[in-house]
Image (cartoon, rainbow, N blue to C red):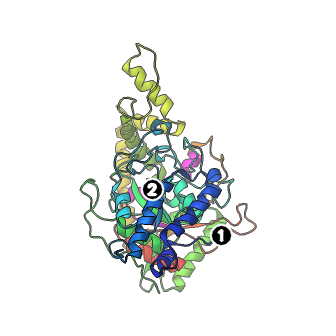
Amino acid sequence: MPAFSSFHDDRARLRAGTVTHEAVLDGFLARIAERNGRLRALLSVDEEGARAQARALDALRSANALDEAAMPLAGLVLAVKDNLAVEGGPLTCGSRMLDDFRSLYTATAVQRLVEAGAIVIGKANCDEFAMGSSNETSYAGAALNPLDEARVPGGSSGGSAAAVAAGFCHAALGSDTGGSIRQPAAFCGVVGLKPTYGRVSRFGLVAFASSLDCVGPLTRTVDDAALLLQAMAGADPNDATCAHEPVEAYAPVASGDLDGVRIGLPREYYADGLDPTIRQRIEAEASRLEALGATLVEVALPRTNAAIATYYVLATAEASSNLARYDGVRYGHRAALPAGASLDDLYTQSRTEGFGAEVKRRILLGTYVLSAGYYDAYYEKAQRVRTLIRRDFEAAYEQCDVLLTPATPGPAFPLGTHAEDPLAMYLSDVYTVSANLAGVPGLVIPASAPLPDEHEAAGLPVGVQLLGRWFEEATVLRVGRALTGA
């Protein structure tokens, strides 16, 4: 991967006065102009707005009026997944349904980053309504993996991961409902952080599955991820599900040895179905952690094999409810119908035209599991299994501090590989959905070595996943930094 600057490095140059905010922005805009037409990582670019922000920061810095404590992210160039609201900007969710919609307000997570000095450069491509694992369900067309343009960048936050990997921004925001930050981070060789459920406000995030959705950053380094989390985290009166837990000092991330840290290796994550070479890479990272002073412990998460089925009952049920608001009446796509058409005709035609195949599939699944006669057999049972999955994590964390697992069963796959096989696509999230069901934080970092020459995906990155206890992001970040060194 090209060695683009992290925000940590650029911030040092900005503070030293060796470069201006506008000059840093120009570098990103040049790369966007060169590659985004092919990659489709960004659906829209706000050059005028970004340049105005950069010039305002330069004016403050030249007048010695820039408060570094109040604006720790001054100059950070940020892309925002297009299911997060930015006032006045597009909010399409990668769907025809919202193709012409403009945001009326700004999401809390985005607002907090802007107040901390971040410069919003544009909106990132995503699977339609965040439903997908490859970014191929986007109405605007699939984003491509910058490391191999014949392969997917992952999903649903594929555009966000691709934008960071291609050097279009320092960082990007994504959303993670079942792995949608972590799987793209693994495929694109960047850092992806899913905070504890409720750690970051969901206000301004277009809902997919409200009990699972999380907002988090994709960055080039663990240090940068910690800086963004520090700025975003904390209670929000606009989001009743946002936790009131105290916000720790995530940045700067502690470095050094890992004496006393117990690393759990859940045996179910290393079973059949995992690419053997990826298993070798993860085991090598475990050995590195041991060399840094950590203790390795084998643990069990016995309900892991039920996670995918549980997730696709609960997530689709919530999706069918959340997406009922797109009816062609108040906002969103409205079908053109002949005079005399009924309201039912309007609903049916607008939703038929506005939603893509994967969104329709999940609405139908969700409606089915919530229907009379099937609620107890599917939805209620899935809720019970979700509780058991959480208890598995509680038991595991009695033996360890952080779990070390693969992020994906294989590397980024070629475009179109699972286009006709939804189940195979769903199984690509087999190592990530459990964290959403349990609500724990998860960090994905690139392994120290890519896939070897003899592998069909030679040179592509391998994602290492670290799962921590609830609201203990600081510990997860510490272990991630120990492995990456930044």
Query: Left of 428 or right of it: where is 315?
Result: left
Q: Which residue is mark 2?
A: 49
Identity of the amino acid at label 1?
Answer: Pro
Q: Which residue is mark 1?
A: 450
Who comes first in sequence, dot 2 or dot 1?
2
Residue 297 seen anywhere in this rendered image of the structure: no
Query: Left of 16 or right of it: where is 317?
Result: left
| Proximity of marks 2 and 1: CB atoms separated by less than 8 Å | no
Q: Which residues are magenta?
A: 423-445
How many other residues sit within 10 Å of disc 1, few (<14), some (14-19) or many (≥20)? some
Above or below: residue 411 compared with residue 255: above
Image quadrant holding the N terminus, namely bottom right
Say which element carries label 1. Answer: loop
Above or below: residue 111 compared with residue 133: below
- Residue 344 has which mark? none
In which image quadrant can residue 436 be found?
bottom left
Query: Left of 41 or right of it: where is 337?
Result: left
Residue 347 lies, in percent from the top left, at 41, 26
